[in-house]
Image: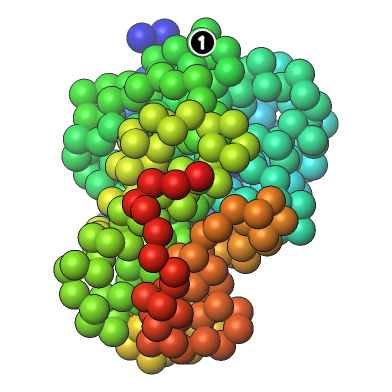
Amino acid sequence: MKARTVAVLGGGSWGTALADVLARNGHQTCIWARDPATADEIRGQSTNRKYLPGAQLAESLDCTTDLGQTLEGAEFVLLACPSHALRGVLGLAEPHLAKPIVISAAKGIEIGTDLRMSEVIAEVLGQEILDRFAVFSGPSFADEILRRLPTAVVAAAASKHTAVEVQDLFQNSYLRVYTQPDMIGVEFGGSLKNIIALAAGISDGIRLGSNARAALITRGLAEITRLACRFGAEETTLAGLAGLGDLVLTCTGDLSRNRTVGLAIGQGEALEEILAGMRHVVEGVRTAKAAHELAVRHGVEMPLVEGVYSILYESVEPHEALARLMAREPKPERWS
């Protein structure tokens, strides 16, 4: 494996975990973090207790608050910031970029524009970036990657060469990376699964049982596929790691932030209080709003997304949202 120079933009749990993989793979890896204390801790102690308590990071991993220094000479730039911060971070980074391969590990849809992360990146950096761009997604908790537990993910890119470059960058004995050409499907799978995970958590919180959870996951996948295919995704993509795989993990795993928030809502806690007590960004809350607007605008029926949106933004009680779902007109399982 050839050693490469990689800049990671984002010092949260996801960015730090992926940066640790890259450093352990022998690449010269530097994280850009906004918080000076986080940067000092990663650089000086090889820990990030704020976001990853108990984890010991690769000693070679560097971190700084100087964006220009982070990006200097970078052959790859990994975007691991929250989706709502991506446009602003790109604006700051753009003057320092040469012609690296850009990798998006951000999962979400931008509120206000309804753009996927690749579309935001192309809008800020120019369409030509898509020849050197990949989406990195799949069922993967940061904590388990840091523990070097077996994980399989996807590197999706319009350019096969770019996809293979990203695959080679990350692949090792515990992280298996598959290449994939369908960026649209991978992006929709990675962002919309967070909404269904909120629904699964709410369902568990009001004790609807295992049957209901299985139905939510299955019908949630149908909704994700319906919207993604409306924008040109391949249906088979959503049956793979970036679709079904990520959806199952996020809806059932105890480390899922979105499921945890849904569980608290189902148990009667107020959303504002739940989020105030969390250090991490919960992407599904913002994505539910963006996806609802996108579905309405394009005439795509997404009753589960609509139900989550009504609970989060219209103060509908979970049992009322459930009653509305169950009272819908009967229909075939597959329809267009």
Q: Which residue: 61% across, 62% down?
A: 292
Q: Is residue 134 left or right of residue 41?
A: right
- Give the answer, above or below, for where 336 lies relative to 95: below
What residue do we see at 37% from left, 53% from top? 332
Name the spot of residue 293 as percent of width and height, x first.
68, 61
- Relative to 22, is 262 above or below? below
**Residue pictured at 71% horizontal, 17% vertical:** 99
199 lies above or below 103: below
**Viewer-proximal residue among 202 and 333:** 333
Circle 1 residue:
160
The amino acid pointed to by label 1 is: Lys
Picture quadrant where residue 309 is located: bottom right
Q: How many marks?
A: 1
Q: How is the image coloured?
A: rainbow
> Looking at the picture, how far across and down is residue 244, in whole percent?
33, 43
Q: Is residue 258 visible?
A: no
Image quadrant in which you'd find residue 155: top left
Which quarter of the image is occupied by the N terminus? top left
Asked if one can make out residue 268 in the rendered structure from this viewpoint, the answer is: yes
Of residue 180 and residue 224, the one placed in the foreground of this image is 224
Quick check: 161 left or right of 113? left
Quarter location, residue 3? top left
**How far from the left and from the top, in percent, is residue 42?**
45, 48
| Residue plotted at (55% across, 78% down) | 310
* In-image side of 154 versus 122 (left or right): left
Q: Residues within 10 Å of mark 1 (few under 14, many from 20)?
A: some
Please tell me which residue lies in front, 328 or 156: 328
- Give the left or right position of residue 255, taking residue 196 as reference: left
Question: How far across and down, in percent of the image, does residue 104 sit?
Answer: 56, 35
Report helix, strand or loop for mark 1: helix
Against 164, residue 273 (above or below) is below
Front residue of this view, candidates 254 and 313:
313
